[in-house]
Amino acid sequence: MSDAQARRVQEQFGASAAAYVTSRLHAAGEDLDRLLAWGAARRPDRVLDVATGGGHTALAFAGVARRVVAYDLTEPMLVAARGHVRARGAANVEFVAGDAGDLPFRDESFDVVTCRTAAHHFADVPAAVRQIHRILRAGGSLLLQDILGHDDADANAFILEVEKRRDPSHVRSYRATEWKAFLRAAGLTVMEDSVIWKLREWNEWTGRMRMTAEARRALDDFVRRAPERCRAAFQFQLTPDAIVSFNDRQVLIRADRD
Ligand SMILES: C[S@@+](CC[C@H](N)C(=O)[O-])C[C@H]1O[C@@H](n2cnc3c(N)ncnc32)[C@H](O)[C@@H]1O
């Protein structure tokens, strides 16, 4: 990936590592339950969690796999994740630093790869998917969850601006058809997929990325001035004084290596 994008990710997440460990939205949820149910059914020996963040997915999979590797670009995030996972008593998780587009693992060395709430930060998603395909064994599964791109161009442009103002390391989210094309091109076959909604509580969501008061005011203003139909596409809840929350759709995919 470009050095500039790597720097943006490391700046954003390095300073917010503790907040990702304590984030309720990351610690649990229907999305994590679904990924875990898909993964447990595969009875995996080795699992790689790409872009592990606070380590929540790695920790969940530590209960169903013999060995988990938690992988992330941001070293302070890995330190926070290690502290969190060890404090929860999981001794079978190892922590490795690096980029999703350049996985330092042998071909066909994992049964399952997880990647949750992270791919929208990757500079080159097709490259990451090709790497994941390379290190999965035949019949192994990628279990993916990420923000779903919106089919309406205006709604998509609106939420992209919101996301980038809150977190400059956000690159973009992809529509289901785009994900399926990336996966197919890499040699992965979609076996199961679904879409769920995830509620974002505005103060928590903007606060986790430590926006300045000025940037936050400008973002609130941008949301208030946006066309009603763009806000409605994400179920924004506003009072006269405050933005309360919005909802976005998350795509969940299980794709197997042929
Ligand atoms: C929202 S957090 C991930 C949440 C986590 N997967 C979970 O289930 O709680 C996003 C993480 O992606 C990592 N990241 C972003 N770009 C990356 C890349 N190219 N390679 C590896 N990790 C990356 C960031 O450092 C950050 O820790």
Image (spheres, rainbow, N blue to C red):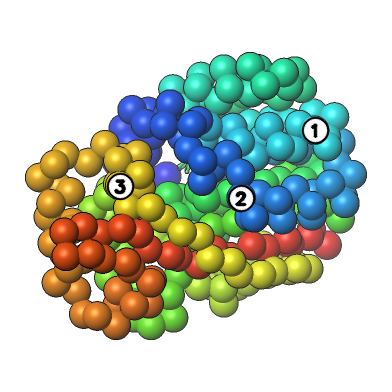
Residue lying furthest front: 240
Secondary element under disc 3, as helix, strand or loop, is helix
- Front-most of residues 21 and 169: 21
- Cα–Cα span, label 3 and label 1: 33 Å
Q: Residues within 10 Å of mark 2 (few under 14, many from 20)?
A: few
**Contact, mark 2 vs mark 1 (Cβ under 8 Å):** no
Who's the residue at 87% across and 51% down the image?
41
Who's the residue at 31% across and 32% down the image?
11
- Front-most of residues 172 and 211: 211
Residue matched to label 2: 29
Who's the residue at 14% across and 47% down the image?
215
In the image, residue 98 lies at what x, y percent? 52, 32
Q: Amino acid at mark 2?
A: Gly
Residue matched to label 3: 203
In the image, residue 156 lies at what x, y percent? 35, 73
Q: Horizontally, is 64 left or right of 1 in the view? A: right
Residue matched to label 1: 63
Q: Amino acid at mark 3?
A: Asn
Q: Horizontally, is 173 left or right of 181 in the view? A: left
